Image (cartoon, rainbow, N blue to C red):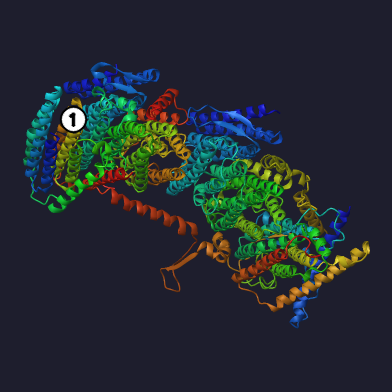
Amino acid sequence: MGFLLLVIPLISVLLFFLVKKRLFLHVISLTASGLMMMIALPLAGDVIAKGTVEYAHYGGFFYLDSLSIIVLDIVLLIGFFAAIYSVQYLEVDVRRGKLDFGKVRLYYILMQLFLFTMILALTVKNMGIMWIAIEATTLASVFLVGFHNDRYALEAAWKYVIICSVGIAVAMLGIIFLHLSSIGVLESRELLQWTALMENAGRLNDSTARLAFIFILVGFGTKAGLAPMHTWLPDAHSQAPAPISALLSGVLLNSAMYGIIRMAAVVNKSLGSSIYTGRLLMAMGMLSIVIAAVFILTQKDYKRLLAYSSIEHMGIIAVAIGFFTPLSLFGGLLHMINHSLTKSMLFLCSGSLLQKFETKQIPRIKGVLKMLPFSGTAFLFGLFAIAGMPPFSVFASELGILMSVFNEGSYIIGAVLAILFVIVFAGIATAMFRIFYGSNENKDLEPGEENIPGTLIIMTLLVIIGITGLWMPDPIIELIHQAQSIISGV
Amino acid sequence: MGALQIENYIQMSVLLFTIGALAALALGKRDRLCNLVSNGICIASGLLLMVASVMKLLGASGLIQIGLLRSTLPFLALEMKIDNLSALFLMVLSVLVVCVSIYSIGYISHYYGKRKVGLFNFLYITFILSMIFVFTSSNAVFFYIAWEAMSLLSYFLVIFESERMENQRAGTLYIVMTHIATAFLLIGFMIIYSYTKSFDLFGSSDAIPDTAKNIIFILFVLGFGTKAGAIPVHIWLPYAHPAAPSNVSALMSGIMIKTAIYGLIRFVLDFLGVQHVWWGALLIGVGIVSAVLGVAYALMEQDIKRLLAYSSVENIGIILIGLGVSFTALAQGNETVGALALIASTLHAVNHTFFKGGLFLGAGSVHYATGTKDIEKLGGLIKSMPITALLVLCFSLAISAIVPFNGFISEWLTYQSIFAYISPGQPGTNILFILAVAALGLAGALAAACFVKLFGISFLGLPRSEEISHVEEVPVVMNAGMGILAALCLLLGTFPLVIIRLIDGVAGELIGRSVFDQLQGGFVITWYSMDLTGTAISPFEILIALGVLTLLALLAIRVYGGKYIERKYGTWDCGFEGINSRMQYTATGFSKPVKIVFRILFRPSRKTEAIGGTDYYPDRIEYKVASESIFEKYVYLPAYSRVRTFSRKAKFLVQTGSIHNYLIYIFITILVLMAYNRFV
Amino acid sequence: MSYIIYIIIQILTIVLTAPLVNGIIKKAKALSQKRTGPPVFQMYYDLYKLIRKGTVVSDVSSWIYKAAPYVVFSTALAAALLVPVSTLVTPANSIPGDFILMVSVFALGRFFMMAAGLDTGSTFGGMGSSREAMISSLAEPSILVCLFTAGLISGSTSLDRMMTFMQGTGTPLTHPATVLLFLALLSIIMMETARIPVDDPATHLELTMVHEAMLLEYSGRHLALMEYGAAIKQLVFMTLLVNLLVPHDQIIGFAGAGAVVLSLLIYLLKVILLAVLIALVEINTVKFRLFSIPNLAALSFILSFLAFLQYFLMGGGHVWFV
Amino acid sequence: MSGLFDTLSVIILLTSFVLVANKRIKSYIKTFRIQSAFIALAAGIMGIQSITSEGRIDVLVVCFVIVVLKVIYIPKLLNRTYSGVEYKVEKDFILNIPILVLICCGLVVFTHFCIASIDGISQGYNDLQIINSVSVVMIGLFFMISRKKAIGQIIGFLVLENGIFITAMFATDGMPFIVDMGIFIDMLTAVMIMGIMVYQISDKFDTINIDKLNKLKG
């Protein structure tokens, strides 16, 4: 059953090569991503029931537990939404003569491959394969980042591929050292399998594991956009097409963060305390938040602004993981979910903005609320949400994280965090709010949404983040609790 | 009259409000109907709420608990708890809501066809709801959420007329300032949580060490002070309140800034418990500054609503002075004075709610009728809008602390509490107190000047511009809404014991000391202070005396002077042909002397330039006077620009765009981490 | 019952004496300038005449304009009710009112006066109100601090109790605090009652007039009421000064109606002396520029503040006199 | 036997030094080819060992793949790319050669300083090899920094990959087979993609000097 998740994208890629009409491309991608979501959501139920989902075939490399199912479901949910959004998004570009059939096909193929690599990364037990998959995500999404194929897109893509490949390579070094630390502890068939590592964590070689952790932190941190390895992120996110930005920001970062979490869990268990990893994670997390907060203040390009806000939130999650208390882990995982939903909604909105106004420059835009009555409103609310305003969901998780921080008695960090949240909010408010009001100068734009299904998606997401702020469904809470206990290894 | 019934009343009114909000959205297309329905529902549920809160205040003390929907988030309990303090503020809120909603029935009519009435009413009602939750939340997280929702909704109301650029700026400034303030509150809550492991507002704070309490107090003063608009963190207020539609400004200035006072009482006095004298002293200091500077800036304003907004700053200052006296007294264990001062400040909060709400509604009426808020363009409105003029006059007298209106009572109580507390032995606080007395006096006199200007320039004399020479009176509902408030001001001014009886319950519950038996009399209100023989005033008898004496004067004149012969004639124009409106004293001119006397505050600057013609006979002379707010010029703007430049520089310093730098970052990170790993 | 008597005595004394005080001040100034000057009873004649005249009302003005004179007059009298001319007739339980109320009542009158100044749309009225606003706001803090200190000394804010307490202390003017208070109140009277150096009651030159400018449009009975109100206000403040800081009822050994009459006579004597004193001050000072008035206000504020400090340096309490 | 591997690791380290010392892109590729050849040699020896000892052939397969990919195919690919983009002769490196080499020496020392102390490695029989190979990683990264041309960065990336591979090989007798294969596939795709992008860059920016790609900042 779960294998279908790995099969469907590949099949759909083949089908893409076969068909000749744009309509079929859309249909295939919708059905594929729809199917995958249909499959993935019930899996969560199994995980809650049985704790894990494993299959014996092929050396039993396929492995799902509550931690990975959380991230996986986010991937497929947002993948589905992005697929729906892409239809009209691409159609509009085709109508404007920017794309042809070949480009659309390329887009869908790469998108499915991108999803495939991420699913692979999340459903394997073997850290080596996970690494391969995460490296592959980069390769699959490079041309999506450079999709528009102008100078800017190309530059962004080059930076993306070089920096991420280097980072991931460093992560490989880390995995090797982890491997080294487990020599003589695990027997050969469970080498690099992190479940085994987790079980025997106590007997790993501490110092090698520590060395491994720093390499993995740098490596996956690069992919997760932690400062100071975040540098590729604003370029890539701002240049990619909106649905892809949504995927990159809402999903890819999470998958990388997933790697870090697994690793931190192992190392913490083998070291017996979270101080070592905690310090590093907190340092990088705070640095990311600071950088994001400072850069957002005077940002002129709204997609870059959103990208920096992603950096900020990855930093927040890193800090939460760093504290490694049950409450902070809970908050961190919750924050993963909330941030992905909110941020992907924002990027989809930005896509509508971009197609309506055809500029990314904030000063050139006015009267969004008039021009885009629905997605514009959603954008405004989303900005409030991402800045941590109640009753939206990001607020809840940020509150949880703050509580855990203060609970640990580290008041300074907590206070600094709270202040930084405010600075980010102030930056977003001063930079962005002006685009919503007033009325646009050039009159040839007529108000109204172009991307109807996309707008529906945006509205759905808005409703979700609006409700989950106060009332998160019990299964999810249950999942998060399980995941948290898995991470803390008790 | 058990607690159960009160509970049901409140549930009903909350439910009604919700229904009203939804109805407003549903009927969005049909402006008139939507407006009638939603405001009608507001009035009804407001009355329910008023009944419930009065019952609570008169009934036995104790908590009323009302659970709302459950939240699955572990650290959040959506539950209302109502004690006398909440009930008092709920009562004030409901009274104001009823009056404002009556007013809105007429006022909103100028939106018909132009704006989304449904959306406006939805925001309006949800704003009220959020304030109800702020006043009744039993748990800090719930409080925080309600607080933020309040800010958010009021932000949308402030920028409701968003096509004007200054409204957008005002809105952004407002939401940013209030969010920063909220961050301080959040930190405070978190520190509390880290010690008590709970967010319950009615729990005990014994687990919190003293230093932490001091820090929390500072944070709360910053946070709530910003919301209250206390100087120097007031800068959002004079921009935001004028930007909002007038009925919303009435709510914001009338009750929303009081949520901060509620917060200070609830969290500091009730939860933390006053620890040190300097807490009170700090509040008194802030209060003095706010009271004097607030009214001084108000006097300089030419825009009615900005003037009113600054005067709100002043009144918040007065409230804070009262609160500060209460804190100081409590910190030194003098519960009687503590209770008295608490009553004084809460009473002033109540009074200010009524007359300031009324004044903003009046400003709304003027704007509704004339289309301008600029005093310099108004004049002579008393002839075309007699009722509005009369009501505004009442409110102006009330806010200038003049008998027989309610503003005087609360100031009298504040004076009395200070008087009762000044005693030998603590020179420091004594000097602060006497300064507070001076500040109160100065603020009162300046307020009188300020509102003479407001009333005199805009309602008396000749019309200062063509278009307002033929306006007509506003619809009767609007005047009805204001009329109720004016009647309340007079009632509470002449029979203050009515309201003091209610507030005494608050003091009794919070401080455990009821001073009602020391404040006696129905017509005469007596304060038996310091077990000396009491000091009594009787606004009612003064009112009677004024009436009788006027009659006597009339009688005497009639007897000695014969019948009254009146001759209408033009105003003395020094023999010129016909005096015209340009010759009248302007609002700027009216406040000029004060401006010059207090030039340190205003940095007045003037510029005269002769345009065209010869030096001796220019065609046109332009004369500009400007006065600036020192805080904006010397504190906020520099800080803001510094931050922005820093961010701009840092951005390009780090994100250089060269991939080599990016790789170097990674490289150095690896090296540093390896070294760290080596040494740890 | 005693309350009624008190009210009647108060009103009669104040109403009858107020114009006389004005006359005395004018007379004293005239004499000091080697003029005969108007008779001391001149103001009575003026008022009588004004009342009988018809009145001209500006066609710009509204009801505020006509209401103002009555409000000013009645507020002045109502305030007078709070300042007993003789503590022998004050009702057993205190008068329901204190100096805070008095200030507020005066504020009511002033509010209407300033509004009326703006009502006629004339430039002078506006100018008068604006200046009045400035002066009053400068005077207010010092009045309050001054009376507050006196109240603290005597342990109550209600004026009759304060006066009774002061009598208990023998001759208060021997104490530095009260001396300072005396000077402070004197300068306050100068400010509040439109006297030189703040304002010149005799002028009608628009550059200098403050109080007169507001009355410029008034005529007939309205003017009479305004003038009368001003006179009463002045007398009230003088009463405050003399009865509070130079109490006299304690020297009357016996009780009964005779005592009341005697005390009233002494009161008149004190008031006349004070009037002469005020005249002297007026003669020996020049009128300030409008913007030097703050100096005078600051002076009076400092005086009252010093008095406050004195009170505490002496250890405070209510026992330091005896 | 480990002595032989020590020698090999040192030689591989030296080749990376040579790489840093190179000036021309042609010679980058040549040096990379040599380095890969030595790695293949090491892998081959190790493979024979493992066959003789425990009969695993996967290491030999890995060695074969290395020969095919890194010694033959990728250098050819890079040569084609390089001759495909027109290339102005200009100074390619940021600092001059001697300083670069000195810095690389410093890197080796630093790596030794940081890693040799880690007991999990130092008590093992193979710490010299690990130190050398980690230094190769570092040098590869540093090479990427020091070169301006796109192809230079690709080479740097490949050397980095080589370093990682030999680290794996020396430290743990190679990763699990599937992982190794996956790594190779990834690397191949990465190099191909980069190659394509080099073409695009050179016709969009008509240079392959990466310093020209600095429009996106702030």
Numbered-mark total: 1
- Residue A198 falls in which quadrant of the image? top left
User: A300 or B465: which is nearer to us?
Assistant: A300
Q: Position of residue C212 (x, y in %)?
A: 67, 67
Element at badge 1? loop
Picture residue at 39% right of the left edge, 41% below the top: A436
User: C190 or D17: which is nearer to us?
Assistant: D17
Q: Is residue B612 left or right of residue B87?
A: left
Q: Callout 1: few (<14), some (14-19), or many (20+) C-alpha neighbours within 10 Å? A: many
Quadrant into which the N terminus of chain B falls: top right
User: D105 or D92: which is nearer to us?
Assistant: D105
Q: Position of residue B496 (x, y in %)?
A: 72, 45
Q: For mark 1, what is the residue?
A: D174
- Residue A74 falls in which quadrant of the image? top left
Does C261 sit above or below residue B480? below
State the residue lying farthest toward the bottom: C34
Q: Position of residue B28 (x, y in %)?
A: 48, 31
Q: Is residue B391 left or right of residue B252?
A: right
Does B83 sit above or below residue C64? above
Which of the chains bears the disc numbered 1?
Answer: D
- Is residue D104 visible in the rendered image? The answer is yes
Does B463 sit above or below residue B505? below
Q: Is residue B98 left or right of residue B646?
A: right
Q: Position of residue B59 (x, y in %)?
A: 71, 33
Quadrant into which the C terminus of chain B falls: top left
